Amino acid sequence: MSELLRGATLIGATVTTGLMAGLFYSFAYSVMPGLHRSDDRTFVTAMQRINVAILNGWFAIIFGGALVLTAAATVLHVRGDGRSVLPWVAAALVLYVAALAITFGVNVPLNNALAAAGDPDRIADFAAVRERFETAWVRWNIARTVACMAAFGCLTWALVLHGRLSA
């Protein structure tokens, strides 16, 4: 039963972390480059709306689930046969925590500042609002994307190792 729990938790951690890596990556290679080509008003309005829309239950489950499941997988692999998997799961946990630190330390405050600029119908200088947001947000999104993708890679390898141990 504990082997089943280890495997299920590791799968859940891998899937949720993969979904987060994909979300961050999609912003890096499609959303932000697409918005970069737009005018200032469109950019600010779209990002304000995206930042509101993303705060939903599905996002919360995946965002928090990746942390909880990776932490649980780490704890579950501390003993017994799981020890060869442990370094990879622990590395994934550290990498995902780094992505969260970037998110809460940089991206969320930038999102909040963008929201504080107010309703687009009342913003006088869209270029200034965009200037304070875009470059830093994109740079740090790439950093959290790399961290999250590396966490996903570690968890994927941990699954391979877990499968070898279970065979």
Image: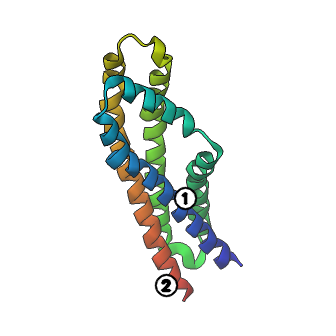
Q: Residue at x 39, y 10 (%)?
A: 124
Report which residue position mark 2 lands on: 164
- Give the x, y percent position of residue 15: 53, 63
> To which quarter of the image does residue 151 belong?
bottom left
Figure check: 153 above or below 53: below
Figure check: 61 above or below 83: above
- Give the x, y percent position of residue 142: 33, 45
Q: Residue at x 47, y 15 (%)?
A: 121
Horizontal relation, residue 129 to residue 50: left or right = left
| Residue 117 appears in the figure | no
**Front residue (pair 60, 6):** 60
Assess disc 2: are there few (<14), some (14-19) or many (≥20) residues with their C-alpha within 10 Å of its C-alpha. few
Q: Amino acid at mark 2?
A: Arg
Q: Amino acid at mark 1?
A: Thr
Q: Residue at x 65, y 45 (%)?
A: 57
Question: Which mark is on residue 16?
Answer: 1
Q: Quadrant of the N terminus?
A: bottom right
**Front residue (pair 127, 74):** 127
**Front residue (pair 104, 30):** 30
Which of the two marks, 2 or 1, is nearer to us in this view?
A: 1
Figure check: 160 above or below 29: below
**Front residue (pair 100, 135):** 135
Element marked by disc 1: helix
Q: CA distance from mark 2 to mark 1?
A: 22 Å
Question: Which mark is on residue 124?
Answer: none
Assess disc 1: are there few (<14), some (14-19) or many (≥20) residues with their C-alpha within 10 Å of its C-alpha. many
Q: Residue furthest bottom?
A: 167
Q: Residue at x 49, y 16 (%)?
A: 118
- Give the x, y percent position of residue 120: 46, 18
